[in-house]
Image: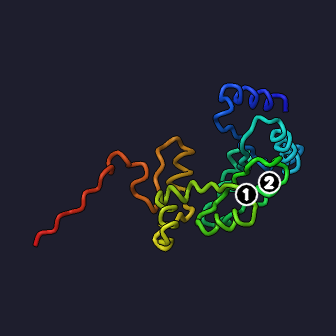
């Protein structure tokens, strides 16, 4: 805890009180104790201690500790939507009133609303869903949820390419990674 505490203290000092400082912690390292893992219980204790320092404004999480855990922590189309919510629940219990951000294949605004309304989280991260459709929130708010271009969890364009230090792309959003070359799409003129 000493190193983490020193880092949080320094970041808070540099950021000042007018900027938000958060902590993203692996809420389950998927490691055995023999392999040096802390498990959910140990990492929840670390999160609890971090939240009680007064240096943080919010808490979020991931899962896993090694690249071999990537597929489990960033679920593809076979993975369950919201599979990391039990980890969010464990952090919410020890967050000392700090807002907790839910993560992990939360793909629809309806699912996000359910999470918020149930009190399981205070905010919801929907990165891949918003890569697939950056206008998702606007469509949802205007009652056009059926027009949302869904994330299918393919992970080949976003997660896999990011892991290889390549620009991201998306199966369902051809403009991703090509924003400069596709900055303004001009509709074709029809000849009469």
Marks 2 and 1 in Cβ contact (< 8 Å): yes
| Residue 21 place in picture, x, y as percent | 68, 37
Q: Nearer the viewer, residue 5 or 141?
A: 141
Q: At numbered mark 1, what does the secondary structure look like: helix, strand or loop?
A: loop
Left or right of 175? Residue 10 is: right
Q: Residue at x 82, y 43 (%)?
A: 47
Pick the quarter of the image with the C terminus. bottom left
Pick the quarter of the image with the N terminus. top right
Report how far apart the C-alphas of labels 2 and 1 lie in the structure. Answer: 7 Å
Q: Is residue 142 above or below residue 67?
A: below
Residue corresponding to mark 2: 92
Left or right of 177? Residue 64 is: right
Residue at the front extreme of this rendering: 18
| Residue 28 place in picture, x, y as percent | 79, 50
Q: At numbered mark 2, what does the secondary structure look like: helix, strand or loop?
A: helix
Q: Nearer the viewer, residue 187 or 62?
A: 187
| Residue 94 place in picture, x, y as percent | 85, 49
Look at the image and name its color scheme: rainbow
CA neighbours of label 1 inside 10 A, class few (<14), some (14 to 19), many (20+):
many
Instruction: Indicate which disc residue 30 carries.
Output: none
Q: Is residue 78 above or below residue 87?
A: below
Left or right of 163? Residue 139 is: left
**Figure quadrant of residue 15:** top right
Residue corresponding to mark 1: 121
Q: Nearer the viewer, residue 165 or 100?
A: 100
Q: Residue at x 73, y 50 (%)?
A: 99
Note whether residue 139 is visible.
yes
| Residue 185 place in picture, x, y as percent | 29, 56
* Mark closer to the chain start, 2 or 1: 2
Note whether residue 35 is visible.
no
Q: Residue at x 52, y 57 (%)?
A: 130
Q: Residue at x 40, y 57 (%)?
A: 174
């Amino acid at each position: 805890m000493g190193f983490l505490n020193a880092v949080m203290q320094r970041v808070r000092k540099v950021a000042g009180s007018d900027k938000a400082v958060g902590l993203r912690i692996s809420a389950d390292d998927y490691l055995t104790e023999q392999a040096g893992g802390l498990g959910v219980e140990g990492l929840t204790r670390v999160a609890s201690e971090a939240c009680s320092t007064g240096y943080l404004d919010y808490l979020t999480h991931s899962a896993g500790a090694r690249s071999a855990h990537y597929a489990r922590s960033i679920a593809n189309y076979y993975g369950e939507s919201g599979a990391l919510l039990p980890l969010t629940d464990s952090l919410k219990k020890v967050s000392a009133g700090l807002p907790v951000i839910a993560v992990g294949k939360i793909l629809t605004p309806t699912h996000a609303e359910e999470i918020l309304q149930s009190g399981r989280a205070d905010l919801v991260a929907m990165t891949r869903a918003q890569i697939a459709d950056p206008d998702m929130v606007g469509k949802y708010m205007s009652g056009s949820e059926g027009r949302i271009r869904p994330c299918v969890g393919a992970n080949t364009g976003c997660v896999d390419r990011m892991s290889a230090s390549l620009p991201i792309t998306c199966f369902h959003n051809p403009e991703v990674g090509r924003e400069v070359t596709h900055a303004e799409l001009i509709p074709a003129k029809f000849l009469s």
